[in-house]
Amino acid sequence: GKMERFRDQGEALCSVAQTLIFAGKSQEAAGFLKRARAVAEAHGFFSVECRACTGLAQLAIEQGRDEEGLDLLRNALAAAPLDEEEETSYELPVLLSLTSALLKTGALDEVEPLVVRFREAGKAESKRTGQLCYSELHSLITSAQLLQARGKPREAEGELRTLLDLAFANKAAVEKMMPGPQLLLREATLFLKSLDPSIGAPEQQSLTAELAQMRLGAM
């Protein structure tokens, strides 16, 4: 029907914007995203509003307009649970972007409940799909970053070890996600080493060997 065509139009505008972003044409991309957001707000398409606001937020943050970016991400997160397409989760990528941005600005009180929400949403997505999802892994490193910022290095270390254990226990699922987890797992291992300098050569070699087995290359 007519409403379906409007939603398709909004989705198409977001897709064109994404292509322009990859091509380095940020200004043109912003124009398409603003049009998509207008369509979404006029017709109540929350999934389109979520995508458009997330895209605009990423552009704003890249251009140093952090507060504007954060407001757009908050708006995207508010729209995400209202998504009318139940089979697609828009919440996880927004939580990933918003928690990362808030941690960089040091807004620990605001980010803390969102990190908990990110962890729960990541676990729920893994359960729904029947295999480990990238967001669940990423939520653990985000949790570790928050704990480190709160002055809790041992708890942060625990989250990183959980992340690595989870990845190694689900190697087949992690290999399917490539190349995304490659940098994430390397970052987690280096983060762990910085928290616990006492990690000796044998343990470090063991981690490196595990990563290499997963076709992630040497540390």
Image (cartoon, rainbow, N blue to C red):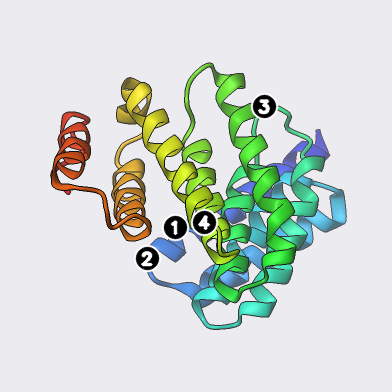
The single residue placed furthest to the front in the displayed view is 198
The single residue placed furthest to the top in the displayed view is 130
Decide: few, some or many residues near mark 3? Use Cα within 10 Å; few <14, some 14-19, many ≥20. few
The residue type indicated by label 3 comes to Glu
Residue 182 vertical placement versus 86 (above, below): below
Please give the residue where the numbered disc 2 appears in the rendered image: 23
Give SS at disc 3. Answer: loop
Q: Position of residue 194 (x, y in %)?
A: 33, 60
Please give the residue where the numbered disc 1 appears in the rendered image: 19
Q: Position of residue 124 (x, y in %)?
A: 64, 28
The residue type indicated by label 4 comes to Val
Please give the residue where the numbered disc 4 appears in the rendered image: 16
Rendered residue at 28%/58% (across/down):
197
Residue 146 vertical placement versus 184 (above, below): below
Q: Quadrant of residue 117?
A: top right
Q: Are marks 1 and 4 in contact (CB under 8 Å)?
A: yes
The residue type indicated by label 1 comes to Thr
Query: Could you give the CA–CA distance between mark 1 and mark 3, rounded to whole angstroms?
Result: 24 Å
Q: Is residue 19 left or right of residue 72?
A: left
User: Sequence-wise, which precedes: disc 3 or disc 4?
Assistant: 4
Query: Could you give the CA–CA distance between mark 3 and mark 4, rounded to whole angstroms?
Result: 22 Å
Rendered residue at 37%/65% (across/down):
23
Q: Are marks 1 and 3 in contact (CB under 8 Å)?
A: no
Q: Nearer the viewer, residue 169 or 101?
A: 169
User: Sequence-wise, which precedes: disc 3 or disc 2?
Assistant: 2
Query: Could you give the CA–CA distance between mark 3 and mark 2, rounded to whole angstroms?
Result: 29 Å
Please give the residue where the numbered disc 3 appears in the rendered image: 87
